[in-house]
Structures are given as structure tokens and as C-alpha cells.
Amino acid sequence: MSEPKIIRFKDIARAGDEPLVTLTRDDLIEIPQLGDAPDVQSPQARWLERYDFSLDGFSDFDLPKPKTKEEEERLVNGFLRGLEKLFDPQSNWPFVKIFRLSLDYCVRCQTCSEACHTYIGSGRQEIYRPTYRSEVLRRIYQKYFTPSGKLLGSFVGADVEVNAKTVWRLLELSYRCNVCRRCAQVCPVGVDNALLAREIRKLFSQEMGIAPGELLKKGTRQHLKAGSSTGMTPAAFKDLVEFIEDDIFAKTGKKIKMPIDQKGADVLLIHNAGEFMAWPENPAAFAILFDAAGISWTLSSEAQGYDGVNYGAWFDDVELARVALRQISIAKELGVKKIVVGECGHAHKALCVLADRVLPGDLSLDQIPRESCLPLLWEIVKSGAVKFDPNKNDFPVTLHDSCNVVRLMGIVSPQREIVKAICKQPVREMTPNGVWNYCCGGGSGFAIMNSLNFDQWRKNVSERMKIKQVLDVFNDVLDPSINKYVIAACSNCKGAMRDGIDHYGLWDKFHITYGGLVDLMVNAMADLPQPYIEFGKQG
Amino acid sequence: MKDENHAFFHPSSLILLPLREGTMEWFLILFGWISAALFVIVSAYKIYRVATAPLNVRWEVYPVPHEEGERRHYGGSYMEEVDWAKKSRAGSLVAEFVEMGQEIFLLQRVRKYNVYGIWLLSLAMHWGLYLGAGLLGLLVIENALPALAPLTNVVGVVAFALGTLGAFGLIAKRATDRNLNLYTAPIDYFNLLWLAAIFVLGLASFATAGSFAAHRAYIGSVLTFQPAPIAPLVALTFFAFELFVVYMPFSKLIHYFAKYFTYHSQLWDDAFKVKGSPTDKKVAEQLAYTAAWSAPHIVPGKSWLEQAQNPNVEK
């Protein structure tokens, strides 16, 4: 591993298209079990003229570079206008207090650096340090908005020039953080550099409408318009449910009718709609378990009601409130006792935590409770209503903790208790685990961002630490004759695991695969004639 | 007729050189009070500004120390249960104090997670400050209880020695470690140098006299408004310190108060909203604020609630 290049804050304003850093395989943290990991691919030559790769040679933004002085000025002015609004108590009331505290009181001790899987995974490249982007933003703010910065300039660190390159690189840099908030967890002052990354994203989205296409145009906009961020309409959803019912019958011999729009049911179960399309075995497993446990539940076929995602959680407070308001209103109209969120981490956090204070009183948590599926699943196991045979799960299992569910909601124990009860072998805990886990690398939308060559960055940098953890935890059973299972009870994490397993060849080399927790539970159901999990066929 | 040798304070005396006898003593008495007052006023204003800023959304990070029993250790929360919204919760404030205490007195997170070798130096500097504050308190009390002098000597010397070691050590560390150097602006060195100067002056003024008697006498003169002769080195020590006290609330050196809010309003704020509660009313008030953003998906001039109710998508 070569010594990382020193990149100063002023460099972010550097003219030209040359990236501040260019990554090769040798720069990245080593994964000993892999020997030669795949190399990092450069962007296609035909893109270079049209798109901006000047941060690190990667981008998800298929927006053309500014061509004229006027276009550059528009970008710069929009950025400065948006930055000012981040400090406005009305325009940014949801976060202004903690945004200011994080911006004003970092003591630059760098305690957070080693908490960041991206920084470490990248071979400790300066630009990925949690404090680098924050310090750039801080220095811009000081230079353009504070009397001390205007008066004392570089003496107080107010030395970053804002030009079109600065703005673009900072935009890119805000999408080099998974917002897993491991840095905030270790900060002695409680500064939240992940929040600052999110605030930069928000500035671009809410002021200029600039966000990755997968998150805004094909994300929240599509969610609010078509009904789901996948583009799935209510009619298509109903078709898919029928298909899943047939599939359940084919696999288990159980004839299960998945309830839709059942007024007065106890539970509105809300999945990430991506599950229906990419991993239909997951909603199917929920249906099998809930049916067997005799739970009164329903799905919704209303637009937004069958897709629990809320991409606003990653970049836009207005979109966050819109999606959450609609989802919770649907539950209220159905007259259910509560919403239970399926295996989707950010949907957990958006519905159960974030939305709590952006909606009116009638939609408060005490009026329409929103809960994780994990405690309910543990109740099912504890109750004995469903019989599980741990011998059916006789293979090495590890548990990946979704940041949103674990670190950001404190749901740590139920999933571990479940695994203990349904698996023959003790769960292999990764190092670190629980609330101290590392992000899968797909967090805050990265798992679905595939424009231009962003996937190259995700696979090689942000997912790297998780892949290393997985290989380390199975190090003594890497023999491919032994099937191994990574539990990822979150759609985004599953997307990242699928991506990483494919990129690093973990199935071919070591027979490591992944899947949900409910899949594993159904696999252990005593009355099923054949295994539910089909090793080697995931995703 | 005024006694020229025992002058009343007059602003002009601050700039007239050479100083009339007694002028400096009076100046230091008044500056002692003024610096303390400015510190309190500016700090209170800053705390007020943060405390009255809009209520933020929930943005907690686990472990949250007020959680019950084992949960506080492994990072669990009340959301690990079904139907948690209907259950009562018993939290522990003591655990919050213990956590804060470990942070304040041991710099726990720096000790555990900082890999750049700053913990001991930072701890020394912080304890220099804590003991320095203790010294100030002892000097006040000592005016009534002179028997405390030996304790004052120990506390003072340890405070200044630790502070000197910590401040100079951090300067050296920041200047030589590439991981810290890039992030250290000139003002950060300036702050550390200023602190180091105060600690060195404190040590030197003690060493010259072999006790803190002169320091106690100065504090006594401040408290009683009775000017007393003051040695130049002691005067310089207090002047450097009092000037720093004025400067502190304007700098990020008051991160200790920010820390209260970052922990309690952000990392540990896990309270969910109940309809009709003060939080709910506050949120309702804030939902009426205008979301004055300009992107195409934002409806111009509408409140936050109206934005949420209007997805702004073409049918």
C-alpha cells in the first residue's frame, strides 16, 4: 500500500479536470484471503469530455459539466445561496441546531478518522477522512459568511475559494460518505460529520434540484408519482403479490393468501418494494411466518403504501416529509393498530425515528405506532406458535448489522436471539459488531446508485471493509464445500452484499452467500418439506 | 483634592504612560470583574442562542446511556420491544452523568478511539484547566481560610505543570503529525500558545515567590475593591488569563457547552412525540415556517406542512 497523497483544502478549488486522487488496487486496504482483488477501472474515455470526474475519477452524476461562465456562476451562486439557507432557522429548522454545532465546534482531533470504513478501506486517502469535507465546508462558510473569516482570512482557516470546481467536487464528496454515523459515535464533542455530508446533499437537492438520478428523479419523485421508487404501480404490485403466492405454494405447498388493504388489521406490513422485484422470497417468508403465527396483518396496495422506502432520509427533508406523511396516512385510513417495517434499514429509521418530528400531531408515534419487524419476529419465536428446527440451519452464519436498525435505532438483541433459536451453529459475530458495526458500503443510497462509474467506487472502496469482515469471520471455514450465510436484514445491505459477493467472487471462491433473516427463519420451519434457502441462487 | 498617588480609576489611565501609582492595580481589579462579566454574558448569550434554536428532528446514535439495564451497555433501545409506544420507560439519569463524567475527566472517547497519540497530552491540558479553575476557587477561599495555602500550592503547581506540558505537547504534535497538521489553522496554534503562556507565567510567578500569596492577595483585592501592590509577573499572569477569559466564548474553546447540546439534543435525544405534548406543539409551530428553498420540486412560498401535503408531482 503506497503512502496516501497529501491533499490540502485549497486543492478542492483547483482548475482543470485532473482528479485530486486516482485510486488503484495498490492504494486500497489489503484483503489477505483474496490475493489479487479486482483492479479499479478508470472511467470510460467517452465520458471524460462531457462529465466531471475531477474529485477522484468516479461519479454518479450524469449531468454535463458547465460550459459557459454563466453556467459556472449559476452553480456557484446557487451553492452559496443554499449554504446560507442551511443556517436559516426556518428554512432548515429540522437540523439547523445540530448542523451549527457540528460546524462550529469541531476541535480537529481526528478521533473520528479510524471509525470510518471508507477512509480505512481506501487506504486512508485524505479526501475520504470524515473531517475533510466538513473542513472544506467550514472554511468556505468562514470565508464567505463570518466577520472573522472576512477579516482574518487564512489565519482562522478561511481559505477555500468557491468556484465551479469547488462546488462540483464538494457535491461529489458529499456522496463519498454512507452516513452510517460511526464517526459521530466516537466524537468526543458529539460533532456529526455524517450529518454535515447529508446537509451538503440537502443544499444541492433543495436549492438546485441536484441529486443522484436514482435518489431524486427516479427515487422520491417517482415514488410520489408512480407509487414506488421502483416505478411499480398499484396494479403491478397486485400482480406481483399473486406471483409470490404461487411461488410460496410451489416451494412450500402452503396456500397462503397475502392480505391486501384489510381494514382494521392489527398490522400494516410495509416492505421495501425492491424486495418484491429483486428478492420476492423475502416478502414471501414474511407471509409464511405471519400466516403460521396467526398474526392479523395486511399489505397496502395504495400508491406509496406498498413501498416503505424513503430516500429523502438520505438527502432531502422536504421529500422525506412528503413520503412519510403519505405512508402513515395510509395506515391511518386502513385503521391498523400499527405499522411494522419489513427488512429495510432506512425505512426503519425514516418511519420510526426521523419522521416523528416532521409530521403533525395526528400522525405522531403514539397515534400510529411504527415498529421494526425484528421484535415481532422474536415474539413469534418466543411464543412457540411456529415450530423451528435448528438442525435445518446447520451451516456457518454471520450477522451483518444494518446501521439504521442497530446503531441508529438501538435494535440489537432480537435478531441475535432469533438466530440463536433457529440455527444449529452459534452465530459468528463480526469484529466489530452490534452498534459498533461497519456499514455494508451501500448505505444512504449507494447500493442503488449505478450511473457512470459510481459502482466502481462503491465496490472497491465503500464495500471493501465489509467484505474483509465477512472473510475474516469465516476465515476458518473458507473451504467452498461449506456453504456460508451472511444475514442482512435490510434491502440496501442485501444490495451491497450481492454487489460485493459478485465483485470479489465470494460465492465462486468460498461459497459465501447472503439473505434476509426471515428467509433463514422459514428455512428452519419444522413443517416445510424442503429447504427454503437455495444456496447459490440468491439475487 | 485628589491624591495623585492613589488615583481613582479613569479610562485615560489605561493609555497614559507612565502609569500613575495604583493605576495598574485598579485596572487589574476592574478588568478582573469585566472579564468575568463578559465571559458570563457572552457564554450565556451563546447558550441561549443554541437552547432556543428550533427543535431538531430525532437523530440519536446508540448506545444511549439513559437506557435501562444491559441495554445501555450493548447499545439497545426501547424499540427492541413490541408495542413500545404503549409502555412506560424507566431511564437512568445517573448513567448519563457517569458517561459525561468519563468524557469530561478522562476524555474517554479520545482515549479509546484516537490513534494519533494525543490523549495523554490532551488530558494533561484539560486537567491543567480544571485544576487551574480549582486554583482560582482556592485563592478565593484562602482569603478567608489562609490555612489552605499548602493545598493551593500543590493544586496550582500541578495545574500549571500539566497545562504547560499538555499545551506545548499538543502544539508539537499538531505541528509534526501529518494527520493533524493539515487540519490545524494558525488560530489553533495561537490558542494553544496563549494557553501555554498562561500556564508558564503561572509557574514562573509561583517560582519567583515560592508561593501563591501574591496571587491570593490579588484575588482578595478584586473581591474587596482594595488595590494592593502586585508584582509585575503576577500582574502579567492574571492579565493574560483574564484576556483569555474574554476571548474564550468567542472561540471554539467553549466546546464544553456545545458538547452538552450535541449529546442531549442529538446523540441521546430518543424521546418520541406524543400528540398534544409540548414537543408536538413545538413541531406544529415549526411546521408553519416557510421552506424557502428554490429547487423545482419545492413549492414556492409554502410552509413545511404544506410542502409535505403537496408532493408537487404532475398527475
Image (tube, helix red, strand yellow):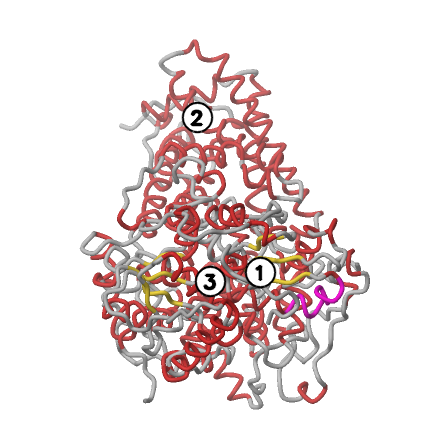
Whether residue B199 is visible, yes or no, is yes
Gap between marks 2 and 3 measured at Cα: 57 Å
Check the image and report above or below for A273 versus A346.
below
**Residue A258 percent across, percent down from the top left:** 37, 71
Residue A36 part of the magenta segment: no
**Residue A219 percent across, percent down from the top left:** 45, 78
Front residue of B159/A106: it is A106
Figure quadrant of the N terminus of chain B: top left
Which chain letter goes with mark 3?
Answer: A
**Residue at the spot of label 3:** A343
- Helix or strand or loop: what does disc 2 sit on? helix
Q: Which residues are magenta?
A: A499-509
Check the image and report above or below for A350 versus A188.
below
Q: Is residue A328 left or right of residue A483?
A: left
Which chain letter goes with mark 2?
Answer: B
- Helix or strand or loop: what does disc 3 sit on? loop
1 or 3: mark nearer the eye = 3
Asked whether the residues under marks 1 and 2 belong to the same chain, the reply is no
Front residue of A283/B228: it is A283
Figure quadrant of the C terminus of chain B: bottom left
Gap between marks 1 and 2 measured at Cα: 35 Å
Residue A506 part of the magenta segment: yes
The quadrant in which residue B222 appears is: top left
